[in-house]
Amino acid sequence: MLRWLLPESIADVLPAEARAIEELRRRLLDLYRSYGYELVMPPLIEHLDSLLTGSGRDLGLRTFQLVDQLSGRTLGVRADMTPQVARIDAHLLDRDGVVRLCYAGSVLHTRAQGVLATREPIQIGAELYGHSGIEAEVETIDLMVRSLAAAGVEKLRIDLCHVGVVQGLLDALGPLDPEVDVDELYRLLQGKDIPGLHEVLRDSPAALREALPTLARLHGRAGAGFDGTGSALARARAQLPDAPAIRDALERLERLCASPVLQRWQQLELSIDLADLRGYRYHNGITFAAYVEALPYAIARGGRYDDVGRTFGRARPATGFSIELRALAGLLENGAPASAIRAPWSDDAALVEAIDALRAAGEIVVQALPGRDPGPQEFVCDRELVLRGNEWIVDPVAASH
């Protein structure tokens, strides 16, 4: 076996891709700052019990584990940064009122999200704490759409769901057969596996056996009107029980779909999928996933997770999103190579001063080392520093014949 081979679904990032990722990262963090989001940097590893607090079993299965050589305790390499940021808000900042935080960093997964996905995504996102109203979802989805637009995404579909619908069905029509694995039930729902649902629910109450497969069929365009006429929401109102939790969840989805802030995005298609229960099980309200034509998996995900802060000592309304930055940067068109200035290698103080001034002004200056051909690189030296009299000036590179 070759020693330099990397693990499956792990890859190096080469100069052109690295530049695209870094430039997009800076652009998005500047965008989040313009909305009032403050940057935080959680650690790559934490004690496992802290890292997985408030999350479901699926996040634990995606988390690499190791033993701390200093304490002997089990550590985890983060697979998702959202619980870490919730811990910072609830336990370290301890602020009252609305708090907006953003972040960017690598996460590591034991298994890739899809066939073409990496196990080391670069996650960038924003989280809003302290407001339970629908305005929080509107702001975060608007910011997510604006983030994707910054990468040139021209057509976008966002699938909306509300965890309260499933929970409302279980509460109103249950109890669920105790032998049923809830994670397996969620997997069958999100996979729209109607025969599988009938099989796993065979010993559950009849009303539940009918309602949950119905839920798997309730997906489609959100509809333009507040009342959702002809939409998946209208069908949900007609076909699901009129339980308070279900009614409240559907009304909240309708208010979100009717938001003028979101309707102004011409490239955005909102759809409803009440069985789209993907995620890490810490969500307890509206969830959303963004899809683009070029990728077979969601480029961004988010939702409401009010209960996570409680596990860190302070319950806080919370909603936010995260984007797979490396995949998003891969959607960018390959730009022209960066323009640079070629300079000779010399100890001439005037040359050194001229190079420093050009670099301070934002120019790329590449010095040619003695006897070395610079070779192919991502910079095009279309200008050069030349000595005219006693002054170093920038001239266009003469065309070769």
Image (spheres, rainbow, N blue to C red):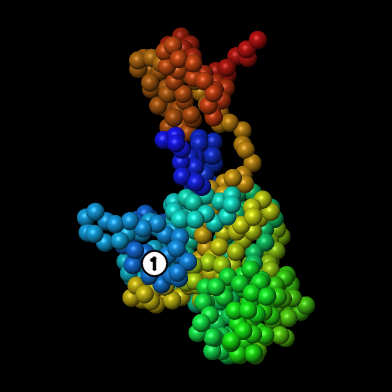
Q: As rendered, which of 2 and 228 lies closer to the eye?
A: 2
Which type of secondary structure does the marked residue at label 1 adopt?
A: loop
Foreground: 263 or 55?
55
Q: In this view, does 180 lie above or below 322?
A: below
Work out whether residue 122 or residue 138 is closer to the camera in this orientation and state it.
Answer: 122
Which picture quadrant has residue 250?
A: bottom right
- Tell me residue 57's x, y (percent): 45, 69
Q: Which residue is drawn at 53% across and 26% down?
A: 377
Amino acid type at mark 1: Leu
Horizontal relation, residue 115 to residue 393: left or right:
right
Q: Where is residue 304 in the image (x, y as percent from the top left)?
A: 51, 72
Q: Nearer the viewer, residue 157 or 347?
A: 157
Tell me if residue 321 comes above or below residue 243 in the rendering: above
Task: Report if residue 351 is visible in the image.
Answer: yes
Neighbour class for label 1 at 10 Å: few (<14), some, many (≥20)? many
- Residue at (46%, 23%) from the top-left corner? 366
Q: Mark 1 points at which residue?
A: 52
Q: Residue at x 76, y 79 (%)?
A: 229
